[in-house]
């Protein structure tokens, strides 16, 4: 515990900001200790022949109205300024701790009263509280210390209260309470040690604030009085003579800012050091982009393709060179065709969808040999044309309807925007269209619903609204990225059937992204199976069970429980873990998890090649599995054999 | 037009939430006002020793002290004094200054406009600068872009925010008043006399707010719904102004309120630098002169000002973010 703490503090000092803050604070504290000892005589020496002079060789910062050297006075004033600030901070912290822990030490009822008073006090700015207390305690050094200390207290009390409330709710405190540990002991032994760090950080920052506040009060004449002097009083004196002799006001001002900054930066450096507890990110090897002998070709889409993708690649800059989570993706979609992309999370499904929709943002980079939507090349179309084309003809449906709507705008407005932007409708027409579209996706009472906010919709209703947003235009393609994952099963089925009926009614193509091969099977004509950023198999859904050749596809199918699955046995899983896109191995990416993997598989990556029927597969051993149905027996086999390939 | 009004009308389902919100907020305001008034009343009684003796000095004849105590009603039992205080407060009587003999309400009436003016302009300036600046910086530095711009902006705003307003005021007096001689540095005369006080008050909060707007906007730009907006292919300025900014502002308003109430207090220091004839210089003079009725009155005005700001923040938040009225309960 203590060594961990020490290493963390060492970490604070090691950062550049932390180092300079520590050095600055150490210098200020050192000056506070030494300056009065060394230079008091010089600072107080009166030279009546040198009154109010500017800077000279003898007096760097000039002299005051008694001819005293201002440079030395500023240095010597460090002691009093810092001392008083720390004293006030101690008072504030102690008072704050007492008030903030009242709910634990005094019991719930008294604690609530204290908390209520603190909450009201905290709404008032510190300076106002300080002035209030200064009236009560009287002007002068003692009054000002008390005033600033008590002005700090409410903020600190609130912080303590919040922290203590969090800890007090934890199990170990409850356990201690049940064990009969007294309140005070509970507080000292169990609660306070766990909230210490943020309190130390805030006390440090509060000390900086106290320093500034004190100089403010002294400046106003309410704090330190003659013959004592701190920076605030030097500043006040200096301001009166600023026309004659500006250094007199500027020097103490700079001192206050520097010292205040030293406390604040040190506090923030600690906070940052404590917050950044994660070890240095592990080294990453750059992924070598594998070269394919033959790039994948899309299966012919026939006449009138809606979408043609060839050689699609998405790059992100990584710690050890660019990472390529999507590689060499190629496929085409006919008008009205529904294709599903399946794969584990991290397989690149969603990025593929976003790349097609041109929604990958910097620093991500999309490359493709071909990317055509409705015959328009998206790679070199003007932004304007593209915006209109995609805005009216491409609909997106995202995974989480909870977070995919702007929370503070009415649903109707969020839909209407599309028509205002792309169809040139005015507000009223657009809103009418929005209501009409909501009705089209069977949202009940669409006029009322359009005026509601997203948080007033249920999850399934929100997803309908999202789909209807895509229907504001006349979409030729709906890209639905895990549209049902966040929904419960009944609602899931409703949303899927809605997508199916839209597709049937308007001949809209559908690209459905899902990790659930059964969902895809219910809705789509074709399945594209992705693994480690590549399409590894592409075949009609109807042939999944009979013609799936890629071991990964077969493993996915085998992992699906059905009515005949033996419920006493654990659910089948695909052993091993998905590939980290930053670390793709040479050869076939699935080889480490594959039961059929041989030496060739680990050496070179198989290309995605079509067979006579147009089914495509990327596997060296596709022929070994061809024609064998995916049966229950397969399940046991995949599981048991796969374990061996786990390493 | 009838359609437009129907569109703006709040939902029946929301009315309940709004009423509950308004009642709850009103209740909290009343409690706060009561605490404030009581604190202002007790202030004089908490002063150790006899405040009248302290104000008049040790050499003042006993008869004068007694007469003044009687005039202030300090000889009555505390409860009676409290009742009288509340009664006078409702009647708008705040007492009489012990030094000038003027009614405190008149002093406040004379001085308040100067303070409101300087605080109001400073707040308007801080908002007008910080929101566009924070938004532009967020857009320029989103997703790790524009590192040099980010560094320059962050370091400048940290330094500006660290300088307390009265020190900035002194610096401004030096540069613009003494060195360049462009604008007056003391008193309230023409519009140019506002320049330095307003700047001194506005710069720090503007720097803090701009940072917050940037950070909040960056956070919002990461949100899922921004991707939805982009999928609607709206122009970029729509994304930033209509979707990102309003969401970023909900968090900014809370802090903006704290800054504004701190600004109300900041006028005390700044007014004293510029010899500004507002409430800030009045309260300091009165504290030093131990003119307690005036102090009491001005503290009350400042306190009410702060409470009004807090109320305005809550209402603005409720208008901007419909969830906040529900979340609070």
Image (tube, rainbow, N blue to C red):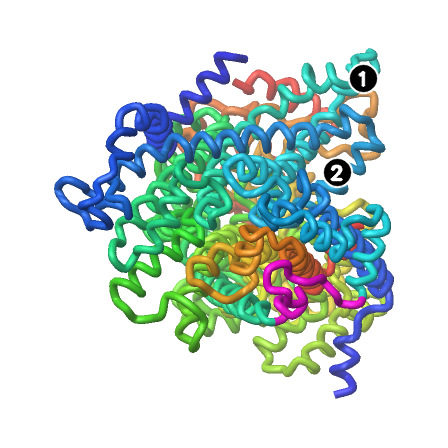
Residues in magenta, as a range: B91-109
- Quarter of the rendering containing residue A138: top right
Chief SS of the magenta region: loop
Q: Is residue B322 magenta?
A: no
The image quadrant where one finds the N terminus of chain A is top right
Residue at position x 42%, y 29% in the image:
A585
Label 2 – label 1 distance at C-alpha: 22 Å
**Residue A357: x %, y % from top left:** 53, 59
Q: Earlier in the sequence, mark 2 or mark 1?
A: 2
Q: Which residue is mark 2?
A: A115
| A480 on left or right of B324 | left
Name the mark on residue A123.
none
Residue at position x 67%, y 57% in the image:
B293
- Residue placed most toward the observer, B96 or B111: B96
Callout 2 environment at 10 Å: few (<14), some (14 to 19), or many (20+)?
A: many
Residue at position x 73%, y 14% in the image:
A185
Q: Nearer the viewer, mark 2 or mark 1?
A: 2
Residue lying furthest left: A57
Q: Is residue B93 magenta?
A: yes
Q: Chain of mark 1?
A: A
């Amino acid at each position: 515990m203590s060594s961990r703490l020490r290493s963390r503090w060492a970490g604070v000092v090691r950062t550049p900001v932390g180092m300079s803050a520590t050095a600055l604070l150490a210098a200020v504290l050192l000056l506070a200790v030494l300056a009065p000892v060394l230079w008091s005589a010089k600072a107080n020496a009166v030279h009546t022949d040198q009154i109010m002079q500017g800077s000279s060789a003898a007096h760097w910062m000039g002299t005051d109205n008694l001819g005293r050297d201002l440079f030395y006075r500023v240095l010597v004033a460090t002691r009093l300024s810092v001392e008083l600030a720390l004293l006030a901070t101690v008072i504030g912290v102690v008072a704050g701790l007492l008030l903030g822990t009242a709910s634990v030490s005094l019991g719930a009822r008294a604690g609530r009263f204290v908390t209520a008073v603190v909450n009201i006090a905290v709404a008032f700015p510190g300076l106002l509280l300080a002035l209030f207390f200064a009236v009560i305690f009287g002007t002068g050094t003692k009054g000002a210390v008390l005033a600033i200390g008590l002005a700090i207290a409410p903020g600190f009390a609130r912080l303590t209260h919040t922290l203590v409330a969090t800890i007090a709710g934890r199990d170990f405190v409850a356990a201690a309470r049940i064990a009969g540990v007294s309140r005070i002991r509970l507080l000292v032994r169990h609660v306070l040690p766990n909230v210490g760090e943020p309190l130390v950080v805030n006390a440090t920052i509060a000390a900086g604030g106290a320093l500034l506040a004190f100089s403010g009060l002294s400046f106003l004449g309410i704090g330190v009085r003659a013959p004592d002097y701190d920076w605030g009083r030097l500043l006040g004196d200096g301001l009166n003579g600023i026309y004659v002799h500006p250094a007199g006001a500027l020097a103490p001002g700079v001192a206050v800012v520097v010292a205040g900054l030293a406390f604040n930066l040190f506090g923030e450096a600690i906070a940052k050091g404590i917050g950044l507890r994660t070890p240095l990110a592990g080294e990453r090897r750059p992924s070598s982009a594998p070269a394919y002998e033959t790039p994948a070709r899309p299966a012919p889409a026939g006449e009138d393709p809606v979408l043609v993708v060839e050689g699609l690649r998405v790059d992100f800059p990584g710690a050890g060179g660019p990472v390529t989570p999507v590689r060499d993706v190629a496929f085409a979609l006919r008008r009205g065709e529904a294709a599903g992309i399946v794969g584990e999370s991290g397989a690149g499904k969603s990025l593929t969808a976003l790349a097609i929709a041109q929604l990958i943002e910097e620093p991500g980079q999309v490359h493709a040999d071909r990317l055509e939507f409705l015959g328009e090349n998206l790679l070199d179309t003007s932004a304007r044309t593209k915006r209109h084309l995609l805005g009216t003809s491409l609909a997106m449906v995202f995974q989480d309807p909870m977070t995919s709507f702007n929370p503070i705008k009415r649903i109707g407005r969020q839909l209407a925007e599309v028509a205002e932007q792309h169809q040139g409708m005015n507000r009223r027409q657009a809103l009418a269209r929005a209501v009409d579209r909501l009705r089209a996706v069977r949202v009940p009472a669409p006029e009322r619903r359009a005026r509601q906010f997203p948080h007033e919709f249920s999850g399934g209703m929100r997803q309908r609204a999202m789909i209807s947003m895509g229907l504001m235009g006349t979409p030729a393609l709906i890209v639905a990225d895990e549209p049902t994952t966040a929904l419960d099963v009944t609602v899931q089925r409703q949303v899927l059937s809605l997508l199916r009926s839209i597709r049937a009614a308007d001949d809209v193509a559908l690209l459905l992204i899902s990790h659930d091969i059964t969902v895809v099977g219910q809705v789509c004509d074709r399945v594209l199976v992705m693994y480690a950023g590549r399409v590894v198999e592409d075949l009609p859904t109807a042939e999944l069970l009979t013609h799936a050749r890629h071991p990964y596809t077969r493993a996915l199918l085998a992992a699906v429980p059905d009515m005949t699955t033996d419920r006493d046995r654990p659910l089948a899983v695909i052993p091993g873990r998905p590939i980290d896109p930053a670390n793709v191995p040479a050869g076939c990416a699935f080889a480490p998890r594959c039961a059929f993997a041989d030496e060739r598989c680990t050496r070179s990556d198989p290309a995605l090649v079509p067979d006579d029927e147009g089914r495509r597969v990327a596997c060296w051993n596709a022929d070994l599995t061809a024609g064998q149905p995916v049966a229950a027996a397969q399940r046991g086999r995949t599981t048991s054999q796969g374990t061996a390939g786990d390493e | 037009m009838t359609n437009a009004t129907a569109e703006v009308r709040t939902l029946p389902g929301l009315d309940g939430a709004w009423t509950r919100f308004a009642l709850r907020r009103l209740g909290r305001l009343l409690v706060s006002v009561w605490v404030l008034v009581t604190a202002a009343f007790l202030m004089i009684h908490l002063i150790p020793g006899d405040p009248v003796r302290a104000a008049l000095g040790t050499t003042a004849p006993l008869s004068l002290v007694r007469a003044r105590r009687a005039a202030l009603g300090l000889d009555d039992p505390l409860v009676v004094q409290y009742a009288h205080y509340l009664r006078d407060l409702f009647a708008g009587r705040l007492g009489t200054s012990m030094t000038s003999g003027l009614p405190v309400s008149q002093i406040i009436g004379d001085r308040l406009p100067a303070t409101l003016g300087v605080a109001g302009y400073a707040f308007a300036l801080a908002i007008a600068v910080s929101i566009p600046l924070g938004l532009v910086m967020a857009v320029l530095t989103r997703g790790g872009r524009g590192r040099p711009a980010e560094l320059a902006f962050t370091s400048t705003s940290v330094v500006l925010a660290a300088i307390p307003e009265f020190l900035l005021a002194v610096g401004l007096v030096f540069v613009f008043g003494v060195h360049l001689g462009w604008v007056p540095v003391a008193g309230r005369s023409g519009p140019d006399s506002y320049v330095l006080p307003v700047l001194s008050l506005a710069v720090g909060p503007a720097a803090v707010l701009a940072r917050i707007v940037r950070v909040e906007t960056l956070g919002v730009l990461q949100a899922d719904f921004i991707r939805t907006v982009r999928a609607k292919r709206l122009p970029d300025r729509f994304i930033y102004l209509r979707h990102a900014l309003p969401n970023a502002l909900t968090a900014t308003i809370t802090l903006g309120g704290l800054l504004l109430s701190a600004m109300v207090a900041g006028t005390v220091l700044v007014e004293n630098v510029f010899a500004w004839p507002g409430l800030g210089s009045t309260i300091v003079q009165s504290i030093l002169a131990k003119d307690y009725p005036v102090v009491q009155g001005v503290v009350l005005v400042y306190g009410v000002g702060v409470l009004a700001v807090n109320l305005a923040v809550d209402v603005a938040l409720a208008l901007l973010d419909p969830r906040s009225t529900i979340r609070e309960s």
